[in-house]
Amino acid sequence: MTGTHRPLAALTMLARDPLAWGLTALVLLIFGMESLKPLFAAAFPALERPVYEQDTFVALVIAHARIVAVSSSVSILVGVAAGIFVTRSTGAEFRSLVESIVAIGQTFPPVAVLAVAVPLIGFGETPALIALALYGLLPIVQQTIAGLESVPRAAREVAQGLGMSATQILTRVDLPLALPVIIAGVRISVIINIGTAAIASTVGVKTLGSPIIVGLSGFNTAYIVQGAVLVGLLAIVTDIAFGRLGRYFERWRFAA
Amino acid sequence: MIELQHVSKAFGATKAIEDLSLTVQQGEFIVLIGSSGSGKSTALKMMNRLLEHDSGRILFAGDEIRTFRPEDIRRRMGYAIQSIGLFPHWTVEQNIATVPELLKWPGARIRARVTELLELLDLEPELYRNRYPHQLSGGQQQRVGVARALAGDPEVLLMDEPFGALDSLTRVALQNELARIHRASGKTIVLVTHDIDEALRLATRVVLLDLGRVVQSGTPMQILAQPASEFVTDFMGRSEVGIKLLGLETVAGRVRRNESAEGTPVAENLTLREALSVFLARQVDRLAIVDGAGRPAGCLHFSDLVKSRE
């Protein structure tokens, strides 16, 4: 009896899972945009080509994800390292300096960074990656500091008193306890990055922003919709996935 | 075991410890007592180098503690504090195994040690092993804290007001267990407290500190019966010194073996202080006494509280 119920239960659970829904919608749209042509043709009758065809949407999504992955990895590495550094006794004096620099990085609009970077470095991926990585630093640094500071003082004192070295305190106590908070920062940073990466197309990088930029310059609203919907869905799916990841690293909290 | 020789320590302009000399012998249960700001916690934390002393020498097993790596010396001393500081993301087992893991004991030995300690501290191993700290009561958490401090089989146990945050019932229960562990293991223990009754109940030697200096050091009996100064008398609670003295002795030492009395008997391992309470509560002047097995052991007269029969 349970044999017939278990797959059904699993299916029901899957059907209720927003991550499953989001992923399905994303995959269907990526591969099925072409077949929505009649729909876009009906919605935008004035347009000659109602679906973006200069690249496949598969290629666009992969390129977009790659830009985000590279720039976010840099943000995470630099941001977490900076957060750890300024919460150690040796780096404490640099804390306000780092926080200011990171805040400035967030204040500069990525478009402005691109405008400055392109004449210096030239067109292409590099200026875009620099702009995105800088822009994504703030939430990661802030949350790393907040997470490390939320570690109970007593736990750190005992860790030291029982004979853990500074590195052991960091890897066994500080980071595991701060991880859910750090992941919350990474989540915000990556989500912002997914949206912002679209503007990299203004300097010639292929992303999901390409149909949007082409659509804007050519008055093709359908292109804009196609690019924007995919960027949005990608962001939603990523957001849910990071939520899961954060809860996984905090699962001890829910033990009953 | 641990020897402080003319040790001083200042925090900025404030002197926390001044010319403190103290020897902790193997197997002693030393209780450092004093009001806040007396330097008792500072003295304790200098012993495992959580704080570094400014001048003087601190010897551990004969060597100046600065010749050891801080981590090594700390792994040879257990450490427990008032706020317990269990690692919230680790199970009870992982918490207790902290020092054995640092010492790289083999897994089977660690597991056996955790079981042994859970049993020693009256926590059903299979029930508690995999729980997280937030699933335990305050008293259970401190039991785990004490187990963790004992886990690496340390030569000395350092405890900074370990029972300060517990309710009085739990506190007394844990004090009794710590006394039992001390008797059974002969481990050297240094405990800091501001609770006089805790000091008198646990210590083999009480060290009273004030303004970073030793005011008096001696057995609980010496501190109460031969206070070195008015300050000691005041600190011990001037009006209650007599009552506290009664708390140091059990009924067994004064019972009249060849007499008997009416009424519900009391156990001979009660302190005289508890016996006094029974006398007053029952409004009687004689109590029937039984031994640990419940057999009649004799009788105690109210007047026996005043002095022992020579």
Image (cartoon, rainbow, N blue to C red):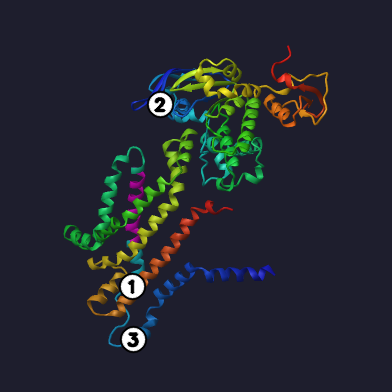
In the picture, measured across the screen, residue B241 lies left or right of residue B303, that is left
To the question of a shared chain for discs 3 and 1, the answer is yes
> Would residue A84 be counted in the magenta stretch?
yes
Q: Residue at x 26, y 49 (%)?
A: A100
Q: Amino acid at mark 3?
A: Ala
Q: Residue at x 63, y 28 (%)?
A: B179
In the picture, measured across the screen, residue B252 lies left or right of residue A55, that is right
Residue stretch rendered in magenta on the structure = A68-85
Reading the image, the residue beneath label 2 is B52
Residue at the limit of the structure toward the left, as seen here: A119
In the picture, measured across the screen, residue B211 lies left or right of residue B202, that is left
> Would residue A119 be counted in the magenta stretch?
no
Q: CA distance from mark 3 to mark 1?
A: 18 Å
Mainly helix, strand or loop, the magenta region?
A: helix
Residue B210: image tag: none
Residue A228: image tag: 1
Residue A41: image tag: 3
The answer for which chain carries disc 3 is A
